[in-house]
Structure formats: structure tokens, C-alpha cells
Image (cartoon, rainbow, N blue to C red):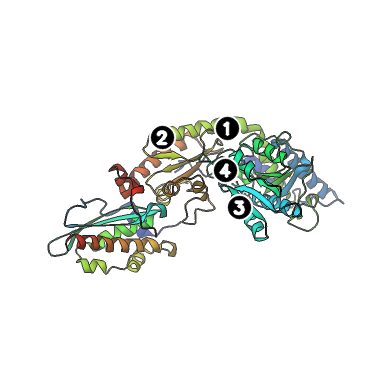
Amino acid sequence: MNDKTDKPIYLDYSATTPIDERVVAEMLKYMGPDATFGNPASRSHAYGWQAEAAVEQARQHIADLVGADPREIIFTSGATESDNLAIKGVAHFNKKRGQHIITCKTEHKAVLDSCRQLEREGYEVTYLDPEQNGLVDLEKLKAAMRDDTTLVSIMHVNNEIGVIQDIEAIGNACRERKIVFHVDAAQSAGKVPIDLASLPVDLMSFSAHKIYGPKGMGALYVQRKPRVRLEAQMHGGGHERGMRSGTLATHQIVGMGEAFRIANEEMATENERLITLRNQLWDGLKDMEEVYINGDFEQRVAGNLNISFNYVEGESLLMALKDLAISSGSACTSASLEPSYVLRALGRNDELAHSSIRFSMGRYTTSKDIETTIKHVRTAVEKLRELSPLWDMYKDGIDLDSIEWAAH
Amino acid sequence: MAYGEKVLDHYENPRNVGKFDQNEDNIGTGMVGAPACGDVMRLQIKVNDEGVIEDAVFKTYGCGSAIASSSLLTEWVKGKTLDEAKAIKNTELAEELALPPVKIHCSVLAEDAINAAVEDYRKKNA
Ligand SMILES: Cc1ncc(COP(=O)(O)O)c(C=O)c1O
């Protein structure tokens, strides 16, 4: 428990983050009858002009964090919508040119399910297997490219295991074959430096709530030079250059802008602090027997540590760690009994996939939190191993793979 | 997932955790489930000359409901004859623990475990 709030210690920043107080303060300026409440699309009065100015200011902040031109930022309701717009939008626009798409098995469901929908429409999708460390092998990606490939979608930072893909190398390979390259950056914006002015990336998805902005708010970067064309998925008043209709949510947009502005200022110092915390956590656990880090340790976002505690089942571990707000797999999948599809794609055996915990740290995590976490985790794992027949067998030197288990 | 009170009680204070020597003649061992599926139960019974289960222990790798189902089962089988123990139904365990529908399979696994333990004992002593 957190001493001050008597609530579980929050270590699920990859699922979402609280809105920073400074962001809340900005957003409040756009809510209430005395606030700047106008419709940013109203051209005929000051209410509209002021709201529009606020939106454009926010667009600038977002563009600044990622080295883009503000005209390349399209507001959406979140990274899910951005992924849908990018993938379906590009696939539909280029339908006559080709109907093949490449992505990776460890992508977020927003990408995978958009691809599944395209498959139902008759497109062909290649789902690449990542290497054991979670990274995409460039040669395998190149080998999957075909003349009718119109889009490659690879995420920047993985939401479960935190690994950072080499989007520059992947982008260059796409450019060589004139294939549009989309990157889901929901987990990397504000955490990993991004410079779209120099990166060979055509489309990039962002989410506000992963970096201390409001939920239900996101953006899609759509490169202007050379111009990337896509088909709108939301039709209406022609907002956002016709790519995404709907009245702009001024307060949400302002919140996202402020969150991105703060991230731009604080990313470097915050990352140093987070790496220290992550090292503290790993140093406190790594001497335990049979613990494994999932995903590459070096090529990893600062706040993420995903660990498998072998011979302990993840759900029971979460139950024992009720004073910690953590997740086993990603928040979207933890309601199902299936082990994490991301860990399976790494080639982790099912036991290790079943025994994984994701710790994600952020702006409000303290060293004391980590100290408490280490204590709780060690106690819980020891207790559950005492209860585990698999642990017994491991200790007796029995090879679990030599046993014929009755799958059920 | 929110857990019922009885599941929590058994999870926090599991009864009869342990291991018997499975080579002894008076011990029956049932190990069911698979690591790949996320649950493995090992249930062991110690049977006296009258064919009555005088002690039972378990170890379980699995979720809280799986741990609770096997813990409760060890309490129930003590003092029962082999036939009485085999007659315990998963629905009784599920009802006692108020398991939600997604966790019914845990009680099924526990029923499989006691059946396997009785079988093992009978095979050894046939
Ligand atoms: C990698 C990734 N992509 C997309 C999303 C979805 O973002 P949003 O919640 O803004 O729709 C998330 C968050 O769950 C994510 O982690």
C-alpha cells in the first residue's frame, strides 16, 4: 500500500497514467460557462477563434515533441482510432495498387484487429514472428515484402514488454520498396526521443493518456512531404483536412498538448529517474531463482520491467500482490484466461507466459514504492512456490518437459 | 477479478499443503492439469487398513480458485472411504466456494484430482 493514500502502489503506467495537475489546470480553462468553450470550427466569432487558437497551440506542442510540422498532426479519439485510420485508411486508398500488409504478432490489438478486418475484406496480411528478445528481424521483414505490399505497421515500443523497435532501419527498408510505414507510438511518445523530420516514417499513432494527458484523446501523424494519402474512416463536416470529421474536443486537445509539452521538457530527467527505479527493482529481484526478464533488457523503454516468475501462476501472484496495482499480460487481455499472446510470440513456453508480471513505473513512482514492491513480490513468490507442485518437481530435478501432461 | 470470501480464506490460509512419499503403498497420488494450461494440481491421500482416508495433502500451481478448490477438497476427503471421496462432485466444491462461471474448471480439476488419487491407490493395492 501507498502510505499516504492507503491505495495500492500504482505500477501500471503502461495501462494508463493519471492526468498531471498542470494538465488538469490547462484543461479547466476550457470547461465551464466562463471558459473558452467555443467550437474551434466557428469562424464567425471570438468564441470560435479563441478555441481554434488553443487547438493550434496544442497541435504545435505535439508536433514539437516528435519533430513534426503541426499540419501533419490529425486529432483522433486515441491511439486505437489512429491505428484504425492509418491501417484501414492506407489499405483502402491503395486497394488498386495492392492488397498485402505486413505487421508483427506482438502488436497491440488495435493494429492486429484492424488487420483482421482487412483480411475479412479480402486483403492478405503477414504477421511476422519477432525474435526471442521481442525485436523484429529486418531481414525477415524485407523477405516478407512483395510488389503488392502497400503498408508495413510496426510499433515503436511494445506495451507489454517495453522493447524498442529500430523504426529507422525498418522505415528505410520500406522507403526502398515504396511501402507506406505506420508506427504505433502510443507507448513511446514522451519516453523515447522521436524526430519525424529525419525518421523515415509516414504515419505515427499517439495517445494522450499514456503520458499524463486525458483518456479518449489521441493523434495521428500524417506526413506531408511526400504526402501520404489515406481514406477517411469517419465522415462528416470535413474537419482535420477531411481525414477525421467531428467537432474538435478543445479541452481534451489542450490537455494532450500540455501533456506533450511537459514531456518534451522533462523526458530526459524523467528517464534517468525511471531507469534508476527500474534498476532498483531488478536488483531487488534478480537473485531469486528462476526469474526471467521478458524482452530485450537494453532496447527497452525506461519505465518497463516484465518478469516471469517460473512455477508461479500469474493470476495467483496478482492475488497475493493485492497491495500493488500491476498487471499480468496487458490490461486488455487480463480478463481472459489465455496467457499473453505477446509472450507466446516471443517463443516463451506457456508456463513462463502464464507466470509473467508487468511492472510499469512513471512520474509519481518513488524509490520507497519500489522498496515495498520488492518485499511484497519476494514474499508472495516464496509463498506460492511453497504451494506449487511444479516448484517441488523442479527442486527434485525433474524435467517438466519429460512429463506427459493431460491438456484440458 | 474479484474473489469470494471463501476462496480468499483458502487462498490465504491453505489447508493441508504438503507432500507424501508417492512410493509408499498406503499413498494415492493424483496429478492433473498441465503447466501450459495454467494449472496443475497434485492431491495425495493416505489410506488406512479400513480403506478410510486418514490424511490428505495438496500442492497446486494455478489461480486462487484452483488453490482454494484443492485446499477445500483435502478437508472434505479426510475421514471418508474411497468410494465416498470419489462421489464428491465438482458442483459441490464450486457451490461451497461460490466460484464464478469462468472458474468452474478449477473445481472440475479438483474432482479429477481426487479420482486420480483413488485410482492410483487402488492400482497399487490391487
Ligand atoms: C501500443 C498501444 N497502442 C494502442 C493503444 C490504445 O490507445 P488508446 O487507449 O488511446 O486507444 C495502447 C493502449 O492501450 C497501446 O499501448
The kind of residue tagged 2 is Lys
Helix, strand or loop at mark 4:
loop
Question: In this rendering, which labeled residue sits more in front, label 1 or label 3?
Answer: 3
Q: Which mark is residue A286?
A: 2
Subunit under mark 3: A
Subunit under mark 1: A
Relative to B45, residue A272 above or below: above
Q: Is residue A295 left or right of residue A183?
A: left
Cβ–Cβ under 8 Å for marks 4 and 1: no
Helix, strand or loop at mark 2:
loop
Asked if both marks, 1 and 3, belong to the same chain, the answer given is: yes
Quote the CA–CA distance across marks 4 and 1: 17 Å
Question: Does residue A31 show up?
Answer: no
The kind of residue tagged 3 is Leu
Question: In this rendering, which labeled residue sits more in front, label 1 or label 2?
Answer: 2
Q: Which numbered disc, 4 or 1, marks the residue that appears first in the sequence?
A: 4
Q: Which numbered disc, 4 or 2, marks the residue that appears first in the sequence?
A: 4
Question: In this rendering, which labeled residue sits more in front, label 2 or label 3?
Answer: 3
Image x and y of residue B76, in percent: 25, 63
Q: Quadrant of the C terminus of chain A?
A: bottom left
